[in-house]
Amino acid sequence: MSERFFLDQPPVDGQVDFDEAESQHLAKVMRANVGDIVTGFDGCGVEYSIELTTVGKKQVCGTVRHQEEISREAARQLTLAVALPKGDRQRWLVEKCVELGVSKLIPLITKRGVAQPVEKAIGRLRRAVIEASKQCERNHLMVVEQGQTLEQVLADRPEVSLVLHPTGEPLESQSIQAAGKVLAIVGPEGGLTDEEVAQASQAGCQVISLGPRILRVETAALAIATWTTLLPSA
């Protein structure tokens, strides 16, 4: 079987109990059988080769035959603080952030925000992280935080922190190439207010532009994610 399966709990004494959702996928969709070898991952970097020992409609169990720490993380840790777009665009944004290796996503609460990061929405996004990680073979789960205000985000910012805004300076690779951690702040559809941009700038963030065109939230977020996570280290 080529698909990967998420372990919401680490193995105990080499034994694995898949949760109900993964069990049903194995039993009903993949039509798994006792003795099949599947790949599991725990979201913390460990990948497991698991032999199935019990296959039921709601419970599948197995025994770990091999385990190994395998990291497929990006060269630097990127935290994206993003004012979430509406609807299905949120899930699409999360999927692509996972594929690109973003370390953390913070739903940003802004004055012009159009989608509020309520608990139910955060739960959906965290499930989307698992599904995307299964597909792209990432073994560390991207963290999706609870919603934070700009003030909260700035209180714990790394040295290299960027604010995306049309009035900013062109992005130069030297500003992030030597960094181990980067924060990028992306405003809502209506943009960050002048006061919010000034607040971030005064806190030490660099205000940058991604070009002459106005980008949608998810486009801007993925553009800076691609630049940051794929840029070789200095």
Image (cartoon, rainbow, N blue to C red):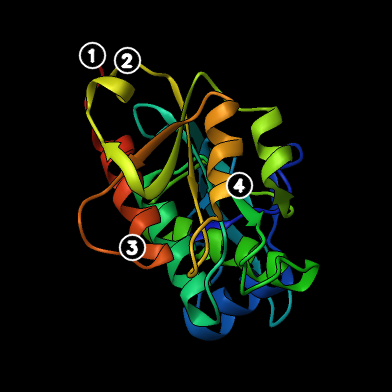
- Assess whether mark 1 and mark 2 are in contact (beta carbons under 8 angstroms): yes
* 198 or 143, nearer to the observer: 198
- Based on the displayed image, in which of its 4 quarters is residue 132 positioned? bottom left
Instruction: Estimate the spatial distance between the alpha carbons at disc 1 and disc 4, rounded to whole Å.
Output: 34 Å
The quadrant in which the C terminus is found is top left
The tally of labels here is 4
**Which residue does the numbered mark 1 point to in the structure image?**
234
Q: Which residue is mark 3?
A: 219
**Circle 2 Cα neighbour tier, 10 Å, few/some/many (<14 / 14–19 / ≥20):** some
Residue situated in front as seen by the camera: 109 or 16: 109
Q: Nearer the viewer, mark 2 or mark 4?
A: 4
Secondary element at tag 3: helix
**Residue 178 — which label?**
2
Q: Position of residue 162 (x, y in %)?
A: 44, 35
Q: Which residue in the structure is indicated by mark 4? A: 195
Q: Are marks 1 and 3 in contact (CB under 8 Å)?
A: no
